[in-house]
């Protein structure tokens, strides 16, 4: 089992101008303490369930470029870029540049998109049917993979077209950077993972749900003759840890006072038990999501000192 950190809120710093410096320090700390992954949320405005829409939010790919220059080992990713936010040929170029800047540490996290209000604010067309957005994502991934690996790319799809396009320099990673498709939709999204992706990402569900969705993914892999074990299975969850039951109760009350609990709150031993269940269900990488209220320094330190050594 490997561990990562997902950065979903920019309220760590009281001054928005210092937001990147705060994240840089967190990324360097994570890299020095055994975490193998750091992802940032790719949104222009804050999303429901994480914070208020007028919170400061930095542009994710600009942030990854900055992190590429101030880290040396940790894998960098978006979790996840919605297909509608950027022309996929341009996204292929951006991602290749970040891979070069990081010397081969990029994972392209991509998804179908869901936040209609954000699309409207930024002038992007929002296909109302999820199936349409998923098909756009699949076609975008196909185009991106060609742009990363072909000298010139001509592609005429249902949604996207390029003609004799050049992308240089190519990514550092060979044959190309890994692609993570985010989402757990069982009929289409996990089927797209089986066909096109190197990793999947499941969000927040309990162990039973993770086990069920991975069984669905295995079925899709069998249907297309894909080796299920070549896909990295990741799970993103909020965690709040404390040393004893009394401290757990205080943290739970603090979080519950600000809205419904949507993550794990418990002792170290309880966390080790649950994480072991996720590992046994097939999860390879557990990503700890830190929104503003869940950005708990003690939790991060307990993960490093008491939890992660159990899964080394």
Image (spheres, rainbow, N blue to C red):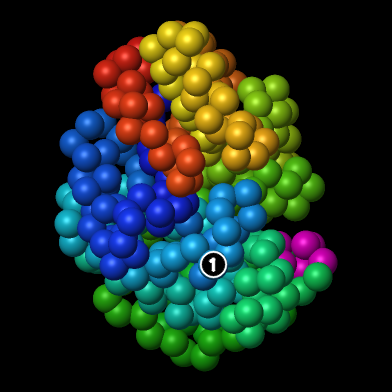
Q: Which residues are magenta?
A: 129-134
Residue 267 in the image: state x and y as whole percent: 46, 13
Q: Quadrant of residue 156?
A: bottom right
From the viewer's perspective, is residue 177 above or below residue 306?
below
Residue 307 is one of the magenta-drawn residues? no
Q: Quadrant of residue 11?
A: bottom left
Residue 217 or residue 106, whichever sits in front: 106
Residue labelled with disc 1: 54
Residue 103 placement, left or right of 273: left
From the viewer's perspective, is residue 163 above or below residue 256?
below
Judge the density around disc 1: few (<14), some (14-19), many (≥20) Cα neighbours within 10 Å: few
Residue 187 or residue 164, whichever sits in front: 187
Residue 97 placement, left or right of 234: left
Residue 214 or residue 83, whichever sits in front: 83
**Does residue 280 show up?**
no
Residue 244 or residue 67, whichever sits in front: 244
Residue 89 placement, left or right of 17: right
Residue 165 in the image: state x and y as whole percent: 44, 87
Residue at 33% from the left image edge and 33% from the top image edge: 297
Residue at 76% from the left image edge and 74% from the top image edge: 127
Residue at 70% from the left image edge and 22% from the top image edge: 208
């Amino acid at each position: 089992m490997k561990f990562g950190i997902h950065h979903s809120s920019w309220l760590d710093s009281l001054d928005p101008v210092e937001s990147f410096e705060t994240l840089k320090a967190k990324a360097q700390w994570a890299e020095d303490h055994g975490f193998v992954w750091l992802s940032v949320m790719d949104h222009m405005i804050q999303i429901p369930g994480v914070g208020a829409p007028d919170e400061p939010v930095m542009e994710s790919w600009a942030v990854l470029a900055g992190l590429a220059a101030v880290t040396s080992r940790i894998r960098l990713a978006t979790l996840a870029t919605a297909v509608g936010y950027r022309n996929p040929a341009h996204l292929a170029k951006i991602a290749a540049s970040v891979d070069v800047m990081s010397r081969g540490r990029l994972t392209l996290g991509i998804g179908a998109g869901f936040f209609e209000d954000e699309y409207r604010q930024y002038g992007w067309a929002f296909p109302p049917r999820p199936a349409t957005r998923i098909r756009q994502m699949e076609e975008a991934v196909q185009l991106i993979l060609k742009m990363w690996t072909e000298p010139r790319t001509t592609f005429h799809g249902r949604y996207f077209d390029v003609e004799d396009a050049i992308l240089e320099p190519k990514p550092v990673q060979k044959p190309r950077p890994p692609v993570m498709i985010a989402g757990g939709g069982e009929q289409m999204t996990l089927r797209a993972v089986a066909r096109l992706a190197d990793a999947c990402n499941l969000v927040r569900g309990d162990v039973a749900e993770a086990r069920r969705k991975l069984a669905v993914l295995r079925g899709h892999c069998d249907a297309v003759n894909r080796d299920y074990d070549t896909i990295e299975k990741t799970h993103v969850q909020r965690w709040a840890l404390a040393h004893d039951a009394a401290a757990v109760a205080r943290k739970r009350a603090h979080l519950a006072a600000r809205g419904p609990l949507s993550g794990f709150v418990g002792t170290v031993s309880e966390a080790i038990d649950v994480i072991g269940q996720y590992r046994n269900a097939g999860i390879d990488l557990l990503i700890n999501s830190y929104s503003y209220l869940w950005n708990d320094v003690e939790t991060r330190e307990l993960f490093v000192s008491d939890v992660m050594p159990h899964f080394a």
